[in-house]
Amino acid sequence: MEKTFLMVKPDGVQRNLVGEIVSRFEKKGFNLVGGKLMTISKDLAETHYGEHKERPFFGELVDFITSGPVFAMVWEGENVIATARTMMGATNPADAAPGTIRGDYGVQVSMNVIHGSDSPESAEREISLFFDEKELNNYDKTI
Ligand code: CMP
């Protein structure tokens, strides 16, 4: 079954949006298989966002994502990578449709509430950066 990495960013944690965001993915029907509140180190932030290293906003991006706790998650389900991206909305909250997470809760592109893997390759890379295999749970839903 497909898995993706999602992370409520420091702005989302500070604004008490963790429960709301978890609830949206639960209600959609995806399975939460891993989750933890953590403060990201500078090293981990630079590795995670490595593809943006040459961008002018890279420093700001690393400073922001390490500025306070994030809620890192692994979700599982059919087409969860693409569907989670749809549910998150456009990267820039100004362009994100109402009803999406960023459309409903975000204002600035640098503080856009949530991160989600954009491809199967990123999902695999990001899950293994943030989680040990033993932190991921397997369960069969009985109801
Ligand atoms: P995310 O999905 O976490 O992946 C990279 C992040 O870079 C993106 O969300 C935005 O929060 C951030 N980002 C993209 N463009 C800009 C920008 N012009 N200025 C600041 N941050 C940006």
Image: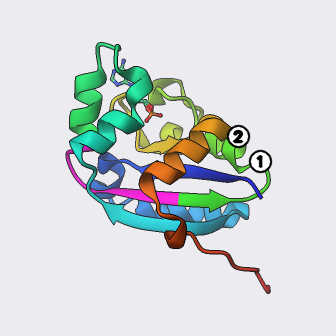
In terms of secondary structure, where does tag 2 sit?
helix
Crowding around mark 2 (Cα neighbors within 10 Å: few <14, some 14 to 19, many 20+) is some
Can residue 141 be seen in this snapshot? Answer: yes
Q: CA distance from mark 2 to mark 1?
A: 6 Å
- The amino acid beneath tag 2 is Ala
Would you identify the image quadrant in which residue 140 lies? bottom right
- Residues in magenta? 66-73
Looking at the image, residue 132 sits to the left or right of residue 69; the answer is right
In terms of secondary structure, where does tag 1 sit?
loop
Query: Label for residue 82?
Result: 2
Q: Residue 86: image x %, image y %?
A: 66, 39
Residue for point 29% across, 30% down: 61
Q: Is residue 25 above or below residue 111?
A: below
The outermost residue toward the bottom is: 142
Asked whether residue 122 is drawn in magenta, I would say: no
Q: Observer-nearest residue: 118 or 28?
A: 118
Contact (Cβ within 8 Å) of mark 2 with mark 1: yes
Q: Which residue was labeled with disc 1?
A: 79
Q: Observer-nearest residue: 106 or 114?
A: 114
Query: Label for residue 57?
Result: none
Which quarter of the image is occupied by the C terminus?
bottom right
Looking at the image, residue 134 sits to the left or right of residue 41; the answer is right
Asked whether residue 67 is drawn in magenta, I would say: yes
Q: Is residue 96 above or below residue 16?
A: above
- The amino acid beneath tag 1 is Asn
Residue for point 73% across, 53% down: 2
- Dividing the image into four equal quarters, which quarter contains ligand 1? top left
Looking at the image, residue 3 sits to the left or right of residue 13; the answer is right
